Image (cartoon, rainbow, N blue to C red):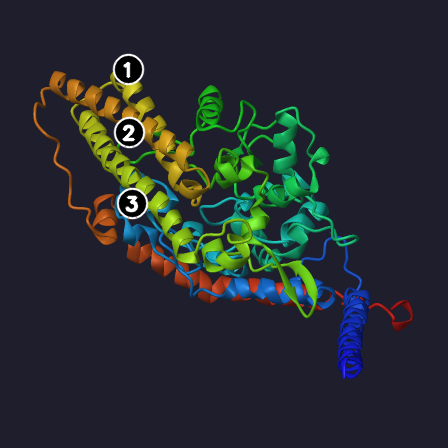
Amino acid sequence: MKNKVLFVVTIVVVFLLGLLASSIINRKSEAKYQYVPQVAIGENEPRNEEWGKNYPREYQSWLQTSETSFASYQGGAAMRDMLEEDPRLVVLFAGYGFSKDYNQGRGHYYAIEDIHNTLRTGGPKGEGDGPMPATCWTCKSPDVPRLMNEKGIAEFYNGKWADKGPEIVNPIGCADCHDPNNMKLRITRPALVEAFDAMGKDINKATHQEMRSLVCAQCHVEYYFDKKKSGIEGTPYLTFPWKNGMTVEAMEEYYDDIEFSDWTHQISKTPMLKAQHPGYETYLTGIHADRGVSCADCHMPYKSEGGQKFTDHHLQSPLNNIANSCQVCHRQEADKLRANVYERQMKATENRLKLEDLLVKAHIEAGKAWELGATEEQMKAILADIRHAQWRWDYAAASHGASFHSPVETARVLGGGLHIAQEARVKLARLLVTLGFNQEVPIPDIDSKEKAQAFIGLDMEKLIKEKEEFKTNLLPKWLEEAKAREDKMDSNEVSMTNK
């Protein structure tokens, strides 16, 4: 009887081992043919769908960046009108494009569509028209490295945003980060390489793990347009202000030394700095960077499908993918992890809003001082305080994930901004008294986006009309021209004999 049982058990075990061996062989066979190329991808191929013929899993996951259903406390993929949520921003950006329109960006899939739609790019009627330079395309498309290669870097930056509209149509994707010859990560935006050179660092020595953040740092950083760069006077050359370091103070010192400003504030006449989105700089000061965790580890975690492990190219908030992003390292429940993130973000927001209130009042009080006849010498130190306080506010606010990536540094930066803004208002109070005004400066009703925009004198009907005319008249011509050009680009199929 025992022999029979042993015989049956042996047969079952052998059968199961056979199934396991068969599965392993099948999976190895799948892996062997997984990346047999279907097309030969050109050096500067901008079309993501072409890359997708060779890398279908990655491409299909990238297509998911078109999803807009997820919204978190401070981010997600759903479009949000930041001016509607916080009308104070209209006053803080008075005289600058962000007072017209400031929507939280959606996924990479919409990079081109969103820049077409924003009021910040205006309603150009043709080449040489519109408020924005061509440099504003730099982070929006894999067509950018193609054009830089064809025209040259400085020539790409030269001219107006509208000048290159027909050339840039493919949203952020494969060619922005990958070498088509071997799929290694690569840097395609020269500003990052030049910034490393300015710091005396060689980006070519970066490890693969570092590259998994540096490809993001091509765009998710602070930058400015240097119109004085040697040899290309007047061209807005994209530059990262890292020569003195990446801290908020180091970049502020850099800007102050070269007397740079993004715009002059419409009310206070302050030479302002606009923080773009220094996500990489703030990430570096956080615990995850200190532990060697890259951007891709959390925003593009590995996943398995059909026995194949690959990087999920659905770039998104880790809070929409906690199991693969967070719980690989953290064993807490998803609800607990999410609550921890929100707690940090809410605490940072509390101080950020206090600083916004102070800055709005400082701008309006400075405007009153000018109205009463203040001199430039009397206003110099005050305007420097307003500039430095708002730079700290914007540095923390525009970094998006900074309040989670680096809550301690974010708190420090906002705390510094609060102190400097208070100093500015104390100086303003003293100055107003000397100018004969010994009372509180009235603050207008700006509790809605519409009221705030009316207060700073924006003609929103005109701006919206110009944008609609652009989308009706010029944009279709851009898209037709782009389609005609891309129709001539061959899909270079690899012959079957090479497979």
The tag earlier along the polypeptide, 3 or 1, is 3
Q: Look at mark 2 in the image and give the residue it sits on.
A: 418
Instruction: Provide residue 333's location: percent of width, then percent of height.
Output: 43, 56
Above or below residue 365? Residue 93 is below
The tag earlier along the polypeptide, 3 or 2, is 3
Residue sitting at x 80%, y 80%:
3
Secondary element type, mark 1 = helix
Instruction: Provide residue 163's location: percent of width, then percent of height.
Output: 56, 51
Give neighbour class at mark 3: few <14, some 14-19, many 20+ (Cα, 10 Å).
many
Confirm whether residue 69 shows in the render.
yes
Q: Quick one: quadrant of the N terminus?
A: bottom right
Amino acid, disc 3: Val
Above or below residue 66? Residue 360 is above
- Of labels 3 and 1, the one closer to you: 3
Q: Quadrant of residue 382?
A: top left
Amino acid, disc 1: Glu
Q: Look at mark 3 in the image and give the residue it sits on.
A: 90
Instruction: Provide residue 37's location: percent of width, then percent of height.
Output: 80, 65
Give neighbour class at mark 1: few <14, some 14-19, many 20+ (Cα, 10 Å).
few
Residue sitting at x 29%, y 45%:
90
Q: Is residue 157 left or right of residue 367?
A: right
